[in-house]
Amino acid sequence: MKLEVNNLSFKYLNSCVIFEQVNFELEKGQILSILGPNGAGKSTLLNCIGNLITPQEGKIRLNGEEVDKMSPKKVAQRIGYVPQIHVPTYEYTVREFVVMGRTPYLGKMRSPGDADYEQVERALDMVGIKHLVEKPYTQISGGERQLVTIARAIVQEPDFILLDEPTAHLDFGNQIKTMRLVKKLAENGFGIIMTTHNPDQVFYTGGFVALLDRQGRLHCGVPEDILTEPSLTQLYQERVCVFYSDELKRRVCISGI
Ligand SMILES: Nc1ncnc2c1ncn2[C@@H]1O[C@H](COP(=O)(O)OP(=O)(O)OP(=O)(O)O)[C@@H](O)[C@H]1O
């Protein structure tokens, strides 16, 4: 299963262009991390890929099929989306919230069955929050909510999962655990597209990386080529240091303060 993004351009009504001529492709089991300054357009790009908003130009295809011509149900079977902030509207328990990920597979008027709930338990176990299963979704923390939303995307069994800043609300330990989880999801065959503000996470997860600059251009490649001291310093307008750690056996990125 291949996701292709061709010549994508987007602007909001009455705004300047957010990004232009964006091109990349990704296979199931691969990771693409998107970095860029605040307001560059990373979430907007994810929303286009998830078919939540329509680009003015360009196409997104899944195995050659145009996403905007697919039914919402079929898109939901192929692409899972974990937004940056999820505002709860009703006191669902975590179990009830996560099982909603099974909706694209349920027939009209059919309720989830034992097998669906077993998937929920497995997904909560995988993200490390099985103990929250009975808790109301409105009574868990922002970070826990993010993990619950990842569990919902897992039970959706999509080919690709879009993660918008999956570590945004997480403490340092949970950020590390989530990056380990992202790698595990890719090893389990999910294609992952995630946005992040931490270049070091990309050296850990590996895969591909894309920098979205302030001019709306996307520069894609492997971390070793794309995440260099000059490119990151230019992107963030602050000194950034990149070096090889013998202990970690990978490159490391830290602020150059
Ligand atoms: N619904 C909207 N209507 C008009 N402009 C919008 C809308 N949503 C976002 N924008 C603008 O589009 C630009 C890109 O926003 P977006 O949220 O995609 O950036 P981002 O790179 O994800 O930012 P951050 O890192 O801060 O989350 C910003 O200037 C933002 O103000």
Image (cartoon, rainbow, N blue to C red):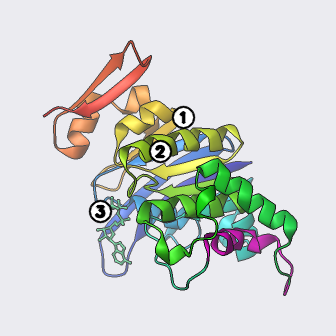
Within 10 Å of disc 1 (Cα), the crowding (few <14, some 14-19, many 20+) is some
Chief SS of the magenta region: helix
Q: Kindly identify which residue carries mark 1.
A: 207
Q: Kindly identify which residue carries mark 2.
A: 33
- Mark 3 vs ligand 1: CB below 8 Å: yes
Q: Please name the amino acid that badge 3 sits on.
A: Gly
Figure check: 123 above or below 109: above
Within 10 Å of disc 3 (Cα), the crowding (few <14, some 14-19, many 20+) is few
Where residue 81 appears, as percent x and y from the top left, is 58, 63
Figure check: 159 above or below 227: below
- Residue at 51% across, 37% down: 208
Q: Please name the amino acid that badge 2 sits on.
A: Ser
Q: Quick check: is 107 in the magenta stretch?
A: yes
Say which element carries label 3.
Answer: loop
Q: What span is colored magenta in the figure?
A: 93-109
- Label for residue 39? 3
Q: Are marks 2 and 1 in contact (CB under 8 Å)?
A: yes
- Mark 1 vs ligand 1: CB below 8 Å: no
Figure check: 96 above or below 197: below
As drawn, the residue found furthest toward the top would be 246
Relative to the observer, which residue lies in front, 228 or 146?
146
Where in the image, quadrant-wise, is ligand 1 located? bottom left
Q: Quick check: is 249 in the magenta stretch?
A: no
As drawn, the residue found furthest toward the left would be 257
Say which element carries label 2.
Answer: strand
Relative to the observer, which residue lies in front, 121 or 58?
121
**Residue 59 seen:** no
Q: CA distance from mark 2 to mark 1?
A: 8 Å
Q: Please name the amino acid that badge 1 sits on.
A: Gly
